[in-house]
Amino acid sequence: MKLTKRIFSGLLAAMMLFTTAFAVNDSATTKAANALMFALKPITGSAYDSTALQTDLAAAQKTISQRMQLEGLTGASAAVSGDVITVSIPKTATGNTAAYWAARLGDRRLCSVTDFLNEEWQFDRADFASAKATTENGKEAVEIALTDSGKTKLTEAHNKVKAYLADSKNDTDKAQWLTFHWGTTTFRMLVDDSFSDSKLVIGGDSDPLRAGASKYMPQYLMLDPLPFAMEQTAVPTTTEPTTPTTPTEPTTPTDPTTPSDPATTDFPDIDGHWAAASLRKGVELGLLKGINGKIMPNNSVKRSEAIVILNRALGAAQADSVSGLAASQQSAWYSKDLGKAIHLGLITANDNRSFDTAATRAEAFVLMARAFAYDRAETAADELSSFTDTSSMTTEQKQAAAALISKGVVNGTSATKLSPSNKLTRAQFVTMIVRIAAATNADSAPTKLAGGTVLTNPSITLTGAVADGDWIFAAPTNEISLDSVSSSHRIVLKGEERAVLNATKQTSISTLAVDPAGTADVKMDNTSSVNTLAIAGKGGSVGYSGAVSNIEITASGRTIVLEGMTSDAITITGSNNTILLKGDADTVSVLRGSGNRITLSGTVGTMVLAGKNTTVDGTGKIGTVDTRMVGCTVTAKADHTIDNIDPGLDGVQITMTVPDKVKAGGSLTAKVSFSGVKEGVTCTAIWYQDGSAIKGCTNNSFELTNDKTSSHTSTFTFTKNMKTSTAIGFKLLYDNPSTGETEQVYAQKTVPIENYSAEWYAQRDAAAILKQVSSVYRGNYTTSYAANNDYSKTTKEVWINAKGYSSNTNYLVWINRAYQHVNVFTGSKGNWKLTKSFIVGTGAASTPTPVGVTTVSYKLKAGWTTGTYTVRPVVGFYPGTGYAFHSRLCYPGTDTEYDFSSGYPVSHGCVRMKHNDINWIYNNVPIGSTVVIY
């Protein structure tokens, strides 16, 4: 069946110029005049620990050597030299240039899939189960089978395309393609009715591979990618010292606080990238500066890099102490930026993470929301309701994601997946920032602001301006005057110290987000107003005077003074704030948080207290107080009080019924019932087995009542050494809104398991294994096949004993032709135990080692010597014949091997072994020992 249609980029033709593969000879010595000599250096995004660099260079050297072997570069070598890899390729092995091979061997070969909107799903080698040569309508192709994780990613991409295609208004010609990226090579895949989510097919009738390419391409695809991209550099002229010299790079970078405009936005890896426009804008704004002349857009953005970029975006200058961070982070090159991030509230002062690792999408959401004050009081239920993978996210991560999604800053990786644990690329992270603010302005009196803008002058006056995007008054800005300004977007105050905003002459603001590192004071004259006032962050005081319809307080630890308003609603979700309400409000709701104190001097219609340990006092008046959380105290005057404390799981008991035992081959059904339920609650119910939650047995909407029951049946795979009992458990979890705590009730019982007898297992093991073991070689004639394919120790022992073989000594030898192994057993008939197993080379297809049962007949320490080879020692079998165990072929009269063939049928009937292995046979296996050839 035709699964996919692909169109190759021009690079693919060069990529598939495979020739006959030869082993790369690492010991080959070739004069520079007869070889291409060049070095490859890592392209990294930050300073590398010297030990980590050497580890990654060793991994890179191994992968490059494997690539050269697959390319058929006979005599080529790759070696780590200090902080580079030196490559030598004999000119007789290639007609291409050093630049060609440097680009080819230094490509990371990262894999990903993108859709028509350039949404990206990154694939690791762990997502590839296997790759093999195949045909499609008679044409060469390569089929990549995917693991479960790979299938999940491809299914997400596929479903997104299908959802888009389902809408008849969309451009189906454009949308029906997915693109598979392998390094710099791309393959387009048509999403039609025959598209499979479980595999990828490259080549075939639409885009034929070069003849013979499918023989080597599967192995190439399954190689590990390089730990970093590498580029060509000069071969070191001096020997690297054993102990690295002290680096000249300073521990703390000397980057300017406010980055200067780069000289160019012309980076070679931007052209043609899906985010090219955003990347160029990021360079123009000073967010990106490049690494060794490249932007590295597809590299995962590290936590440190994300923080550096956000500090640049906000013009951060002041830094707090980093003494509360991990010791390794206090001396890192980015430590000063961590101090700036602490001051601005992007991270906490005691954050114990390593910032030299890649940021997840969820972590990036939080950083972005903190940087641009996207905190909000409402829940994330609406925006996240369509995503099925948010259970691992924290409350703050969900809130941040919902706020950013609602503003179009981010979206899901598919219609149902947010992929919060996926890594984020540098291109994706910068694109998010550019969507918020694609411009900066340092004027004190800007006259024209287009779209989202970051304003950085310490003192700014705007007159008669109409906003068509968010305005972020960045860290350096202290004083703001708005006269006759109209904004239907967000205005954000992010001052590093004291931010003062005065609004006059009918200034109208849709959303004002106040999140200074220090204090803020906002005054609206009696002609001006704000629709939604959001107060976020931690620390200093915030004052607001003037008309405002809605107030959201997500801040913690602030003193907040609100006066001069009659608001519809005030919502509080932060903690430990002191709030002086000198105006009036229809509703004040403390929905989350704890330890808030509200002092009233105005009037409140309804006050809802769902935040723990809330205190309400003052001379003001409340119509109705609805208390839903424990520890709340109200001394202010109230006309009505309502107590809505939730009893939760208090007094609930679980009764579990289980059988006395599980019979051999049987199952276990457990049933639970409940008592002591005071009020019906919706909680989470989970079945457990042996201390772990049973997959698929969690109900997040369990309606608990006294007459409710639940049951579960566990089945077992019976094995010889299985556990003799199992513990079945049932747990109820309830997030009690009145206590802010998660309550739980758990019941468990242990049930014995009756297993089959040992004889029952032995009979079945032997019958299956006797059918499984073969004497026919079906490998690919490589040593690696023998190294990676063999029967298990148990299979070997069961087979040799089930066959009933005996020996005149306490040794027995089995030459297995199927997997090219010699297996040595010790013991006696019916009780043979595997002692040694060696990779060997038996008789070739035209001269096979005969199947049968014989004995060790003689031993020759001197071995055999002819005019062309020496093999020694020799251990004969099949008396009266020339069949024997012996070493691999050596130069006559020496023990120096010149033919290393082993792991596949290669000899004239004898069994070739490595020196150490044949010597072990010679020294340990007595004459007269049984030899089985099968």
Image: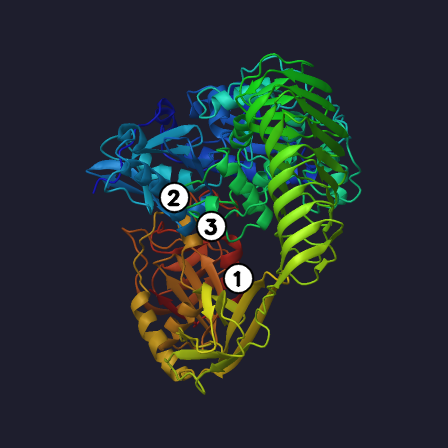
Q: Which mark is residue 389?
A: 3
Residue shown at 29%/44% (left/top)?
196
Residues under labels 3 and 2: Cα distance? 12 Å
From this view, report whether residue 374 is shown above or below residue 770: above
Rendering coords of residue 97 (x, y %): 47, 19
Rendering coords of residue 506 (x, y %): 61, 22
Marks 1/3 in contact by CB < 8 Å: the verdict is no
First along the sequence among labels 2 and 1: 2
Nearer the observer, disc 2 or disc 1? 2
* Residue 304 left/right relative to 385: right
Number of residue marks? 3
Amino acid at dot 1: Trp
From this view, report whether residue 791 is shown above or below residue 65: below
From this view, report whether residue 458 is shown above or below residue 557: above
Rendering coords of residue 5 (x, y %): 26, 33
Rendering coords of residue 586 (x, y %): 60, 46
First along the sequence among labels 3 and 2: 2
Residue highlighted by disc 2? 156
Amino acid at dot 3: Asp
Residues under labels 2 and 1: Cα distance? 55 Å
Residues under labels 1 and 3: Cα distance? 56 Å
Judging from the image, what secondary structure is the residue with disc 3 in? loop
Nearer the observer, disc 3 or disc 2? 3
Residue highlighted by disc 1? 920
For the C terminus, the quadrant is: bottom left
Marks 3/2 in contact by CB < 8 Å: the verdict is no
* Residue 899 left/right relative to 176: right
Amino acid at dot 2: Glu
Residue shown at 37%/51% (left/top)?
904
First along the sequence among labels 1 and 3: 3
Give the camera-side residue of 699 and 556: 556
Crowd around label 2: few <14 · some 14–19 · many ≥20 (10 Å): many
